[in-house]
Image (cartoon, rainbow, N blue to C red):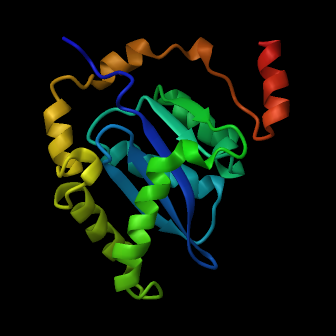
């Protein structure tokens, strides 16, 4: 069976600045475009851990790799250790490389034009409305990048080829992972010591 080990990638960044003091964390699967969304008042390691729990719970398949920008909240030791505990490879982008998170950036542009343009972001139920939008985006909204399919339709096409958690865990080699530093140049030097 041909499995999609590399295709089921994962990317997330919290840069969809909605308004001062309100941030949208976004995860998007590289292959299906399935997303998990949450709004937080701050970009912190604690919120990142909470979001990571949501993503692990809600993604319909095991996460193999997380790619992020170089926000400090992603480099917290607790966050990286949690990824390691779940057999998730952490692959932050090089500085100044927003194009490497193009799918997330594009999906957040869609959020701005199709979701935030239609809701009161100050309403107390904004998190519930965002959950409804997430459901619509994943289950009902056709995507041109998926040839008119929804993320869930694409997932169902690939589910026979998608590895189960135990297969992903077998492929994960913890000796290849280490706690990474947010400072890119320093992290390169640390990597040389390994």
> In this view of the protein, which residue sits in the foreground, 144 or 66?
144
Q: Is residue 177 left or right of residue 66?
A: right
In the rendered image, the quadrant that contains the C terminus is top right
**Where residue 32 sits in the image (x, y, percent)?**
28, 42
Please give the name of the residue rendered at 32% of the width and 76% of the height, measured from the top-left corner: 129
Quadrant location of residue 37? bottom left
Relative placement, left or right, of 82 versus 75 is: left
Residue 119, image x, y percentages: 37, 85
Measured as percent of width and height from the top left, residue 21 is found at: 63, 77
Say which residue appears at 38% left-offset and 66% top-offset. 110
Snapshot quadrant of residue 80: top right
Residue 98 is left or right of residue 169, and the answer is right
Question: What residue appears at the point 22 percent right and 64 percent down from the top-left corner?
Answer: 136
Q: Quadrant of the N terminus?
A: top left
Report which quarter residue 20 is drawn in: bottom right
Above or below for 33 versus 191 = below
Nearer to the camera, 118 or 170: 118
Q: Where is residue 140 drawn, in percent x and y?
A: 16, 60
Relative to residue 73, is residue 16 depicted above or below?
Answer: below
Instruction: Relative to 162, say whether 167 is above or below.
Output: above
In the image, taking residue 107 as reference, residue 1 lies left or right, namely: left
Q: Residue at x 39, y 24 (%)?
A: 6
The total number of labels drawn is: 0
């Amino acid at each position: 069976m041909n499995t999609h080990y590399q295709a089921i990638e994962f990317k997330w960044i919290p840069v969809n600045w909605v308004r001062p003091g309100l941030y949208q964390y976004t995860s998007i699967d590289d292959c299906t475009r399935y997303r998990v969304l949450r709004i937080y008042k701050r970009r912190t390691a604690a919120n990142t851990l909470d979001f990571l729990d949501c993503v692990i719970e809600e993604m319909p398949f095991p996460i193999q790799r997380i790619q992020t920008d170089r926000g400090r909240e992603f480099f917290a030791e607790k966050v990286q250790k949690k990824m390691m505990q779940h057999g998730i490879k952490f692959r932050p982008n090089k500085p100044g490389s927003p194009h490497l998170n193009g799918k997330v950036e594009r999906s957040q542009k869609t959020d701005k034009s199709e979701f935030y343009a239609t809701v009161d972001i100050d309403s107390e139920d904004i998190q519930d409305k965002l959950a409804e939008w997430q459901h619509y985006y994943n289950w009902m909204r056709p995507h041109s990048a998926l040839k008119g399919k929804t993320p869930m339709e694409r997932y169902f096409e690939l589910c026979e080829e998608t590895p189960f958690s135990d297969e992903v865990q077998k492929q994960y080699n913890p000796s290849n992972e280490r706690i990474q530093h947010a400072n890119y140049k320093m992290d390169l030097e640390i990597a040389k010591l390994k």
